[in-house]
Image (cartoon, rainbow, N blue to C red):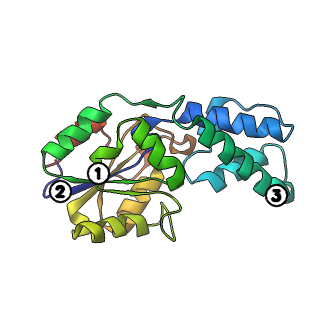
Amino acid sequence: MLDHIKAAIIDLDGTMLDTAPDFHVAVNRMRADLGLGPLAMQTIVNFVGKGSENLMRRVLAVDYDEDGVEQRFEEALASYQEHYLAINGDYATLYPNVIEGLQALKAKGLRLACVTNKPIAFALPLMDKKGLYPYFDVIYGGDSLPKKKPDPLPLLQVCTDFSLQPAQVVAIGDSSNDAQAARAAGCRVLNVPYGYNHGEPIHNVDSDGIVPTLLDAAHQIS
C-alpha cells in the first residue's frame, strides 16, 4: 500500500488510452506524403513516449541518416500533425478499468492531474472525446511547460498547483519516462504493464509496483 497519498498524476498514451492505432494511421499517412512506405504498428509503438518531435525523428531515421532526417523533419512534423488532428481519437480505445479507476481515485478524495508528452492541442480534444476530461483538475501536455517527462518539472508543477509535497503524490504511467520523472521529483510511482515503454520490459523500471489496471492502482493507495 502507498500511504498518505493526496493526489495522482496519470499519463495518457499507453496508460489510459491505447493510442497506438492513431499513431499508426497518422505516421503512415505522413510517410505516404513523403513518398515512403508504411511501417508496422509495433515499430511505431517502440518509438512512442518522448513527444511528437522525437517520434518524427525516429520514424524518419528508418530511411535516412541524421542529416537526411533533419532536412525532412519540419515537413514530416507538419504533415504528421495535420493527419493526427484529423483522426485524433478515431482509432484509440480506453484500456480496461480506466474509468472505474478514475472514479475510485476520486472517491478516495484524491486530486487528479494528467501529465502527458503529447502536445496539449492533441491531448485536450482526445481526453474530451474519450470522456476523461472531467476527472482532472490539471492537464499538462508536452509543450505546456519548458520541459517534459522524464524531466521532473511537470510533476513538480502539479505538486505546486495542488500545494502538496511530492511524497504525497503518486505518478501512474506505462513507461520509464513516468518512473524517472517521479523519482527525480520525489513522488511515488506505479506502473501499468500493458503500455508502450519504448519497447523495453516495464519490469526493468524502478517503481513502487506494477499494477494490472488503474482500478488496481486505486486499491493500492490510501
Q: How crowded is mark 2: few (under 14 residues within 10 Å), some or many (20 or more)?
A: many
Q: Which of 65 and 119 is in front in this view?
A: 119
- Which residue is the site of mark 3? 66
Horizontal placement of 77 versus 178: left or right? right
In the image, taking residue 67 as reference, residue 196 lies left or right, namely: left
- Disc 2 to disc 3, how far (Cα)? 44 Å
> What amino acid is at disc 1?
Asp
Judging from the image, what secondary structure is the residue with disc 3 in?
Answer: helix
Residue on which disc 1 sits: 208
**Which residue is nearer to you in this view: 217 or 70?**
70
- Residue that numbered label 2 is attached to: 5
Q: In this view, does 30 lie above or below 71?
A: above
Of the numbered discs 3 and 1, the one sitting upstream in the chain is: 3
Q: What is the x, y in percent for residue 77?
A: 71, 52
Mark 1 packing: few (<14 Cα in 10 Å), some, or many (20+)? Answer: some
Residue 74 shows in this picture: yes
The disc, 2 or 3, on the residue closer to the chain's N-terminal end is: 2
Residue located at (24% from left, 66% from top): 162
Q: At 43% from the left edge and 45% from the top edge, which residue is drawn?
A: 12
The answer to whether residue 202 is left or right of residue 24 is left
Q: CB under 8 Å between callouts 2 and 3?
A: no
Decide which of tag 2 and tag 1 comes sooner along the chain.
2
Please tell me which residue is depicted at 41% across the width and 65% down the height of the picture: 154
Q: Is residue 79 left or right of residue 126?
A: right
Residue 113: percent from left, percent from top: 32, 55
Residue 169 coordinates in the image, percent (x, y): 25, 60
Secondary structure under tag 2 reads: loop
Q: Depth check: 133 or 186 in front?
A: 133
